[in-house]
Image (cartoon, rainbow, N blue to C red):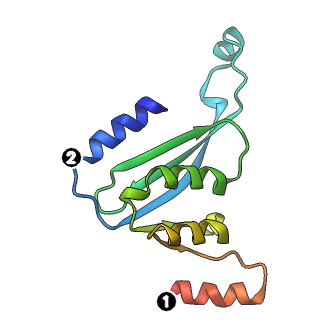
Amino acid sequence: MTRWRVLFRLSTELHELGEVQAIDVIGFDRRAASRRYAKRTNYTVNAVETTILVDCETSAILDIHCSMKQLHDTQICEQVLKRNLDRLEVIIADKGYGWDELRHTLQEDGVRPVIKYREFLSIDAADGVDFDR
C-alpha cells in the first residue's frame, strides 16, 4: 500500500487538483481467483474492500486503502482523509459516511464535508432536505 500511495501522490502532482474530492468504497469478491489457485496457495481471502479518494475535476486518484477486515467504512475513511488533509477542500461522500464525529473532525481541519445525513430521526430527514438544496 505504501508504494501505491507514493505512486498516486507523484501522479497527482502532474495535475492541478480541483476543490472537490470524493471518497467511496467498493468490495471485490474472491471469485476472481480460481479454485485451483486458491487451494494451491492457501488463498483464504473471501473479499477485499477498497476505499478510493478521487479528485472530482481531474479524476486523479489521491489515495487508496485496501482491507480484508470487516471494518466500518467510516473508520477507514477517517484514516484516508487524515492522510490527505493538506489536499482537501470539499469532500463528498454518501450517507454511509454520515458520522457526526467525522464531520466535526473535517470541519476543524478546514475541510467542508458534503455528506448526506443518515435518517434515524425526523430531524435527520430535515437535514437531508438541506443537503439536497
Q: Which residue is mark 1?
A: 133
On screen, residue 98 versus residue 57, left or right, reads right
Q: Position of residue 14 (x, y in %)?
A: 21, 46
Q: Which of the two discs, 1 and 2, sits closer to the camera?
A: 2
Q: Earlier in the sequence, mark 1 or mark 2?
A: 2
Q: Residue furthest top?
A: 40
Q: Nearer the viewer, residue 100 or 60?
A: 100
Label 2 Cα crowd, 10 Å radius (few <14 / some 14-19 / many 20+): few
On screen, residue 6 versus residue 46, left or right, reads left
Q: Position of residue 123 (x, y in %)?
A: 72, 89
Label 1 Cα crowd, 10 Å radius (few <14 / some 14-19 / many 20+): few
The three-letter amino acid code for the residue at tag 1 is: Arg
Q: Quadrant of residue 110?
A: bottom left
The three-letter amino acid code for the residue at tag 2 is: Leu
Q: Position of residue 102 (x, y in %)?
A: 61, 65
On screen, residue 20 versus residue 69, left or right, reads left
Which residue: 44% across, 46% down? Answer: 63
Q: Which residue is mark 2?
A: 14
Mark 2: secondary structure: loop
**Residue 74, label in figure:** none
Q: Quadrant of residue 117?
A: bottom right
Residue 99, visible in the rendered structure = no
In space, the residues marked 1 and 2 are separated at their CA atoms by 34 Å
